[in-house]
Amino acid sequence: MMTRTRYVVLALAIIISLHYILSFSHEGYGNATSFEALSSKFNFGGQGPPGPQDGKVWHEPPYKTPVPEKYYLQPNGTITRKANAAIVMLARNGDLGGIVKSMTQLEAKFNARFGYPYVFLNEEPFSEEFKRAVSELTQNTLEFGLIPHDHWFQPPEIDEARAAAARKDMVDHDVIYGGSVPYRNMCRFNSGFFYRHELLQKYRYYWRVEPDVRFFCTLDYDPFLFMQDEGKKYGFTIALPEYERTIPTLWAAVREFVAANPELVAPDNAMGFLSDNGGESYNNCHFWSNFEIADLDLWRGEAYTKFFDHLDAKGGFYYERWGDAPVHSIGAALFARKDQIHFFEDIGYRHEPFQHCPQAPAHGRGQCECDITNNFDREGWSCLNRYDRIFT
Ligand SMILES: Nc1nc2c(ncn2[C@@H]2O[C@H](COP(=O)(O)OP(=O)(O)O)[C@@H](O)[C@H]2O)c(=O)[nH]1
Ligand SMILES: [Mg+2]
């Protein structure tokens, strides 16, 4: 009996070792680009414990595997477990109407049942009217935070004459928000500061929600628990290219950072989403950051912190109009493993002028109130094909 057990254990050990050896070596070949090859030579500190997907060979994008039933609400509707998470809304007092629309839908489709707190942030104090109006929309906890001055406004190091000339040039070229300083403050804040706000310190995950967005489908599972238990770090619904004129020198700054800090780049990262030539140039693809469900520790970690500081020192948030969408996307793609970036196929979402409408079977399961043929994913401009291809 003893010898037989020993034999089985030995055989299992050999099979498991072989599996790991094969999957690691395979992975190295399958997805190598010059940047990834460079980065995979190094060991990576500061990325936290290995996730459950470590070492897996991907033959298709992770979203093709349905969300496990264990994340769905029980038939009796009771919640047994929650993640440490909040819904984060950056807004002005004047955004109240749009916030009411977004929040009403999010409550109806998800949060009235799941009970996550809201954190509202603003560089000016929220009015009593704003606070009262939003508190009428939910039973859940609400927190209102004031953004510290230095996290929002144009830093004194910025050469205002140069920034003003850049703004004028963008206005002359009809770049959207090209002449706006507040928009640039917002992009820089979202890129490098929102996760440092004192109200967010106690949370690990967040869902970013903007005014005037729509959520089409009933969400019967907890996306935060899904992120947490599956080791995901960044979730999106729409991927598209950025306007080149807003980021002419961003990629040069990224390359400089990677060359100087190769050890901070994650192995098996999503460079293949960002670049069609192994990191040589940026294809301008980014995750549309008006929707994000993500791990705050991704931004708080050493890699992204240094990356943001490097970009901020370049002044591109003001001398150009670097958006938080490309900055976050590049950060997520380089500092997380590709399988830690999740496409929420089952969350129906619209921010003008684009929408993601889930396809079958998610469309039916979520009783999605969207035209199934009106879906950005497969339109010519969608960058979802660049996401898909990094897994195949
Ligand atoms: N507090 C504050 N929030 C802003 C400001 N500008 C934009 N926002 C918020 O930043 C987010 C993006 O702004 P939005 O106007 O929707 O930009 P778009 O989605 O790129 O067209 C939204 O949540 C806005 O409420 C501002 O000057 N102050
Ligand atoms: Mg918006």
Image (spheres, rainbow, N blue to C red):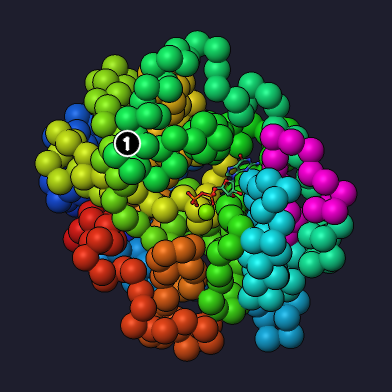
Foreground residue among 204 and 55: 204
Res. 243 visible in picture: yes
Q: Residue 348 appears at what percent x and percent y?
A: 48, 73
Residue ID at (70%, 40%): 122
Q: Taking 347 as reference, is 310 above or below it?
A: above
Quadrant where the C terminus lies? bottom left
- Direction from residue 374 to residue 299 in the image, left or right: right
Query: Would you name the residue on which mark 1 appears?
Result: 172
Res. 343 visible in picture: no
Magenta residues, start to end: 116-131
Q: Amino acid at mark 1?
A: Asp
Where disc 1 sits, the SS reads helix
Specify whether residue 118 is painted magenta.
yes
- Direction from residue 310 to residue 244 in the image, left or right: left
Foreground residue among 7 and 175: 175
Farthest residue toward the front? Answer: 172
Specify whether residue 154 is painted magenta.
no
